[in-house]
Amino acid sequence: MLKLTNIRKLLGLFISILFFSSSVYAEERRLLIDAHIHYSHDAWDMLPPKVAIKVLRDAGLKNAFVSSSSDKGTQLLYNEAPDLIVPVLRPYRKRGELSTWFLDESVIEMIEGRLSKYTFAGIGEFHIFGEDANVPVMKRVVALAKEYGIFLHAHSDAEAVENIFRQNPEAMVLWAHSGFEGPGKISEMLAKYPNLRADLAFRNEHADSGKVDEAWRKLFLAFPNRIMIGTDTYTPERWYYVIDHANWTRNWLRDLPSEVADKIAYKNAQKLADWALKK
Ligand SMILES: [Zn+2]
């Protein structure tokens, strides 16, 4: 639950964002695509679509991959800024379904209905771990992603990712938070699965004060085409960090060779979105 003082702080922040001129950011900023944004029901009142879009634009994002509980949040943002939003279909209707959704067969009907009606680049971000990736609902999700030629945004451990690829070796999987694994394990997984992509959402151990950690640098240089960045606005308060996170990201990206930095910054995400949206 949000405390009243937090709500006031957030409101103050969003009002100042709304009136803050974008020209302040006129200097050259590296393009970014944030691959991990949610706009779920508890953010809608506090942060109306126009304000949310302004936050994303002020962060200097070329695009944002957005998935929301419920999907209405994603559609609200997409209608407001179709050039900016890459819609991803979250299988949750409201907060709190992340540990039960895969046992609820009615989720399938909802996903099938939305997929036939709207455009999506992926299904996710969903939470699935270990053997649960082999339950019927999850299997149907993997099959639907194949049928529509879209990616799966999986907040999963390595075992669940392996189970997904066992069901469809050609699946395109964006590994949310890179599974919260270390660079060694991420590297092993990327080497094993050519269609695996990894986002760095809600992680900060790869860089400090604009310097990239050596083990992570090795990973970024070994797999420059497979990694992307993200904020993860899983609660309304996280929207506060979107701009800061973009700036923090630009700072450490400068510590990498410029072509690698651009790939991680936006080109890899762009390629994934273009593939899924058949551009
Ligand atoms: Zn998330």
Image (cartoon, rainbow, N blue to C red):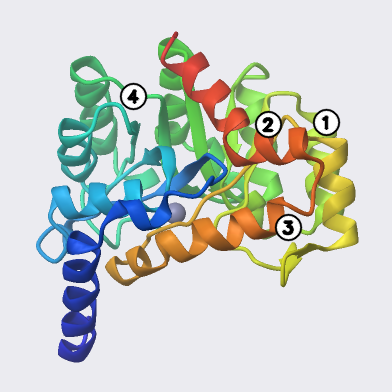
Q: Is residue 185 above or below residue 214?
A: above
Q: Is residue 272 above or below residue 236?
A: above
**What is the number of the mark on residue 181?**
3
**What is the number of the mark on residue 120?**
4
- At label 4, counting other C-alpha atoms closer than 10 Å, the crowd grade (few under 14, some 14-19, many 20 or more) is many
Q: Earlier in the sequence, mark 2 or mark 4?
A: 4
Task: Specify the amino acid type for callout 1.
Answer: Lys
Task: Specify the amino acid type for callout 4.
Answer: Phe
Task: Specify the amino acid type for callout 3.
Answer: Glu
Q: Is residue 85 left or right of residue 29?
A: left
Q: Nearer the viewer, mark 4 or mark 1?
A: 4
Taking the image as drawn, is residue 279 in sight? Answer: yes
Tell me whether circle 2 and circle 1 mark residues in contact (CB < 8 Å): yes
Task: Measuring from the top left, give residue 126's x and y in whole percent.
Answer: 43, 45
Task: Specify the amino acid type for callout 2.
Answer: Leu
Q: Residue at x 15, y 48 (%)?
A: 50
- At label 2, counting other C-alpha atoms closer than 10 Å, the crowd grade (few under 14, some 14-19, many 20 or more) is many
| Quarter of image, res 259 | top right
Taking the image as drawn, is residue 100 in sight? Answer: no
Task: Measuring from the top left, give residue 240's x and y in whole percent.
Answer: 35, 69
Residue that numbered label 2 is attached to: 196
Q: Earlier in the sequence, mark 4 or mark 1?
A: 4
Residue that numbered label 1 is attached to: 192
The span from disc 3 to disc 1 (Cα, nearest Å) is 15 Å
Q: Earlier in the sequence, mark 4 or mark 3?
A: 4
Q: Is residue 62 above or below residue 218?
A: above
